[in-house]
Image (cartoon, rainbow, N blue to C red):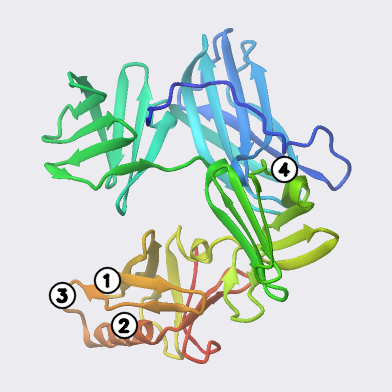
Amino acid sequence: MIRFPALALGLVVASGVPSSGQAGETRAVTGALTYTQKIALPPDARAIVQAQGRFGVTLGEVGTEADRHQMPRGFALDVPSGLSGTVRALIEVNGAPRWIVEGVGFDAGAAPVDLGELDLAPVTPLAFATDFLCGDTAVSVGMLGDEVMLRAEGRDIAMTQVRAASGARYEAMDTPDTSVWNKGDAAMIRLNGQDLPECREIPPPAERPYRARGNEPGWQVSLAAGIAMIEADYGVLSHEVPRPDAQAVPGAYEFAMPEARARLRIEERLCHDDMTGMPYPDTAQLALDGRVLRGCGGDPADLLTGATWQVTALGGATLIEPERLSLNFLDAGRVAGSSGCNRIIGGFTLTGEGLQFGPMASTMMACPDPLMEQERRMLDALEQVAAFDVDEGGTLRLLGDDHRTALIEATRP
């Protein structure tokens, strides 16, 4: 049965956090907490700062009593070197959350990181939300005391509990015919009179699927909820063991599987399949029964989705108003963007061999001829894309049939 989360203020440190750091093994992540009021914290206030890494691993954590200190309030965390992460900070008063800031990222590397001042905002129910996927639609439901909030399609909707024959049912306060019904092992969500497909809870990071693989001698490790599958020698060797917790070590995450005499090491470093050239977000190494097998890990789609790509090159043509050219790879194989004149939207397919775009729909705005011609070139280029790559500098290259010629290049601001 899906349960909306109870409020949990204690931040549990995962086993991946190093207990002590030698030179070069850890680095400092520093900053200062502040909020608009800029008043002294009450004596019963407590500040908690946490650095979160991949696979649900807590990289570092510090908690301090207020002791009537003024804001801004400095903090310093020691985290393993070579790993990226996000910082979350919470101030609680009398054990209740009052201010929060989340998702402040830092890149992998060895140098110290100064995040500057982090502006905390008043806590809302969405700070403690459960995420669901309803078909292709992602939604979040947060609870804080008696407050309930639904986030869907870019809107935050306040909810109130109503009577239900079974389960827990909530209806929107101001938006008509919008409701959330937690019944059985699924959530039923209705938005503006339209029922979404059955909603399933998105698993926490420590349980999400992950796959690493390599060629010669053909191996893969598949991590699922509670289970790790190891195959090698093109399937001749096979093990199924309990999924281990990830351990953060300098420069990598490791999964120890002693039952199979195996250890998987994942480094946050771009990797290319040595047969297809497909880029992957991680470099993988499997130590298996005395052998060391090398390959790639993660999902290539993760290199595409996320922040919007700003187009910087379109073949050899000179770009007109390039700041208006963009691509945004959405989840579930959808892509949107701007051709410089019209908004565009369509689908993309990612296989083990490459990347293809489906037909693109667009708005029908008329623009000056040079912009219309640039739009035609961009749409034609998307039709010809057969593969993609991301270079070490972070530039996205959409490639033609030869998997070498860049038809479109883009970067993230």
Q: Are marks 2 and 1 in contact (CB under 8 Å)?
A: yes
Q: Which residue is mark 2?
A: 379
**Which residue was labeled with disc 4?**
247
The nearer-to-camera label among 3 and 2 is 2
Give SS at disc 1: strand
Instruction: State the residue in front, 100 or 37.
Output: 100
Give the amino acid at mark 3: Met
Q: Is residue 288 visible?
A: yes
Q: CA distance from mark 4 to mark 3?
A: 52 Å
Identify the mark nearer the N-term, 2 or 1: 1
Is tag 4's residue or tag 2's residue first in the polypeptide sequence? 4
Nearer the camera: disc 4 or disc 2: 4
Under mark 1, the amino acid is: Ile
Q: CA distance from mark 2 to mark 1?
A: 9 Å
Residue at image mark 3: 364
How packed is label 1: few (under 14 Cα within 10 Å), some, or many (20 or more)? many
Q: Nearer the viewer, residue 312 or 82?
A: 82
